[in-house]
Image: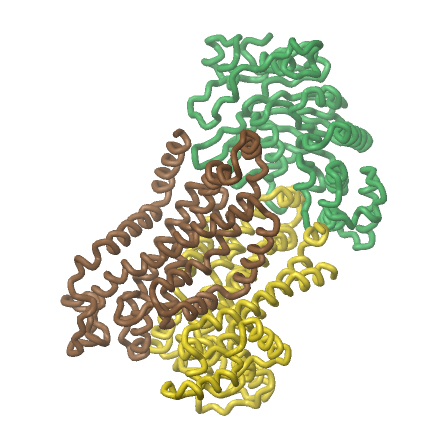
Amino acid sequence: MTAMRERLRIARYLIAENPVNIVAFGLFVLLVLAAIVGPLISPYDPLTTNTSIALQPPSALHWFGTDQLGRDVFSRVLVATRLDLFIAFSAVLLSCAIGSIVGALIGYFGGWLDATVSRGVDILMAFPLFVLAMAVVAALGNTVINVVYATAVINLPFYIRLARAEINVRRTLGYVEAARVGGSGHFRVLRVFLLPNILSPVVVQASVNLGWAVLNAAGLSFLGLGVRAPTPEWGIMVAEGARFIASGQWWVVLFPACALMVTVFSFNLLGDAVRDILDPRLRT
Amino acid sequence: MTSSTDSAPLLSIDGLSVSFRTRRGVVNALDRVSFDVGCGEIVGVAGESGSGKSVTAFSVMGILDRAARITSGSIHFEQRDVLGMSQRQRDAWRGREASIIFQNPRTALNPIRRVGQQIADVLARHSPDSPRVIRQRVLDALRQVRVSDPEKRQNAYPMELSGGQCQRVGIAMALACSPRLLIADEPTTGLDVTTQAVIMDLIRELARSRNLGTVLITHDLALAAQYCDRVVVMHAGHVVETAEVSQLFTSARHPYTAKLLRSVPSMVDRLDQLQAIEGSLPDLRRNDLPHCRFAERCERRLPVCDSQALTLEVVGPHHRVACRNPL
Amino acid sequence: MSRVLFRLLGAIPTLFGVVLATFLLTRVLPGDPAIFFAGNPSMDAQAIQEVRQSLGLDKSLPQQFVIYLRQLAHGDLGQSISTGLPVRQELMNRLPTSAELTVCAFLLALFTAVPLGVMAALKPGSVVDQLCRLVSTLGVSLPTFVTGLLLIYVFYYLVGWAPEPIGRIDPFIALPPKITGFLLIDTLLQGDWAAFVASAKQLVLPAVTMALFALAPLARMTRASMLSVLSSDFIRTARANGLSWRTVVITYAFRNAMLPVVTTLGMTFSYMLGANVLVEQVFAWPGIGAFALNSLISLDYAPLQGFMLVMAAIFLLVNLVIDILYAVIDPRAELER
């Protein structure tokens, strides 16, 4: 209980010390809110086209202007928050959960299981991550859920290796031995004693990973993989607006790009703050 | 303070106060620390961890942390003002006229550089000798500290050497340019007992043969008893007592010194005579620190202890105490 | 030396795994290649079967794998359906273009990030330090394609310095004979100054875009590593011995600080290889990334397979080099055996 109080105290201290942390936290809350209520409060229907007002610069009517099909950019950016956040969170959650468990298992049992899986991870990591994501989406098909899988797959190795290393360190500690001697089976030891203890570094990794996951998903969509028109999603919006940048119509690209930047930035800051709270030793 | 040869002191620390700015407040690490070291004498600086022994040493050598501030006092080496030196002068002075060896000999050495090369770096810095001469001097330095097979050893990396050998290298580096002052900051704490004795004997022998002024920082009173001429006892950033070794161990006058002596197994006849010192070091970040920082742990505390600032009073030949109610 | 051999041997199973993985991957891709190859979806089953047989797609998976391995041993990476040329030729043509971009970007990033990180560590709290931290945080938050587009907007549309971001070089400039495939080198070898300048100008924006991406982790790592080393015991010893500031910072601190940075180089390079595809898309750069993407969209197996293999092989090779480099710099690694 006192450990929790201590953590809260440090959290308050960190937020107070660095005002940027408050900004990051505030942004994060704002983004989650936008994701939840976005579609309900958007001024225009993000899908309705109206070519007569296509490519209009920002104005009082259309705060972010209109795109090449006359759709309101602001509404599209707002509504896209839900999708982008969904992809990022699900991907990280998936890779975190599966990766940690797999890593814990191979770290604990070792032997041929460890050798095989580690070799598999090595092979996975031999491919430049983004290339791998492309391949996974190509193999599974061009849908949103596959973008989630692809992003999850490329993040798996980090969690597997992290969990494996952390379990390895703790496996030989006194309390584990005591538990085994006391009659606990392997899985009970893992579940009750080991996994909760590696939660801290794993959560740190996950929070740091969130920003990267958003970038990944957006990158894949930018290339035309994953999300398909007319679904509003930041990456695909940037892709659609790209060809207009050379002729000076900047708003089609800029606003979704800003949304991306702000999101990734706040996730990264939040990730740093989480890391500072949970494990200051990792501070850079 | 007069030295055993009764000439002007080699090193003179006068009223040194050092504070550290940290996130959680200002730590008043040292408060008006004063003591002298003469040529040819070995002065021990003893006290618990956190008493400010290393801070004093680092202040002399100019290697305090960035957050440190010397708020008052002076340090004189052969009557020259050390704190007033420019960075350039300081760099020329340390390693050549005064040197220090550290507690963890292995981490004190560059892990990816051969030890002979590291000694050569120091020599090259302080003398205009040619590389060939320097190579020879490196070997000489290693021989002086009794490193076996110096031609081979000089090409070793620190991780290939034992703790004792690393400390020998550290001593060789420190003495390579023949300084007149040597500070040894807990030089044997990280070593096993047998090696401790060997290294301490080496340090004493070198100190005597070169007539060095030596400062031996230690938390181990038994060690101080064995190797020092005089001892300076520190507590929470204060010098509480200084005396010649025999005096200190037979007739300590400060309550803290007495308690310290009774808490060390080697200093008592029977183990049941061991007594822990009650309480712990005061939090040095407080603004309301009492004049005597030991007062809150002392049974001999008097009202006058809280009202007047402490000074070191002479209580005997070469014996001074900072206490309002000495034993 | 033995370490090098050991690492090489260790890489072989991984390489085999990579080959197997790429093989399996493209067998999982949707669409029946036989139909696509036949060119006419309404062809009758007989004709499609003939095409399938000729492609060897009717055999069992292990048999196909053996055929695949045999082809690889002969350097045959298959045929690109969309372009009609052998994959190997296509890749060989385009690899130098991508490599030129990646190498330039990498060097740019390295020679900016390291000094920045070192300066930031030497003067904590200063302007340089704030700049370093800003660059690190922003660099990680900015998507590569956004940076690219932004740069195009500012430097091409607004200011007009950069050339039009279409392809490798202005189509009106005569290309020198291909010796290395690196335009910068070939133009120099030819003594064609105008072409050299043109190809360099075209390279600037995409290289800067990629470099910005790699800048962040490198600068951050350098700064952190340098800070950590500067507060270590042996630096204190060096200072206490009066060694000059230059010696302390360069010979003692910097060399030690570079060790973790070298290990980060591998990861950074991997990210760059991945970002390659995005940058080539934004700038219409005719490299292997763009080629692979187009093949992917057209469900053209062989080029994608070849692309994956090449990328993985390059990455493994680069990692090997970095590993060896590390062992050379850090004597402890050698001694740990």
Q: Is residue C87 visible?
A: no
Location of residue A173 with respect to A165 vertically, above or below: above
Residue C294, image x, y percentages: 42, 79
Location of residue B289 with respect to A40 vertically, above or below: above
Front residue of B219/A177: it is A177
Q: Left of B172 or right of it: where is C7?
A: left
Location of residue A29 with respect to C201 vertically, above or below: above
Q: Left of A126 or right of it: where is C37?
A: left
Apparent colour of chain C: yellow
Q: Is residue C327 visible?
A: yes
Location of residue C286 with respect to B143 vertically, above or below: below
Residue in the picture at 82% in, 54% down: B132
Front residue of C161/A213: it is A213
Residue B17, image x, y percentages: 53, 29
Q: State the image quarter where residue C237 is shown.
A: top right
In the image, which lettered chain appears brown? A
Front residue of B184/B107: it is B107
**In which quadrant is the N terminus of chain C drawn?**
bottom right
Count of numbered labels shown in the rendering: 0
Residue C234, image x, y percentages: 64, 44
Residue A125, image x, y percentages: 53, 61
In the image, which lettered chain appears green? B
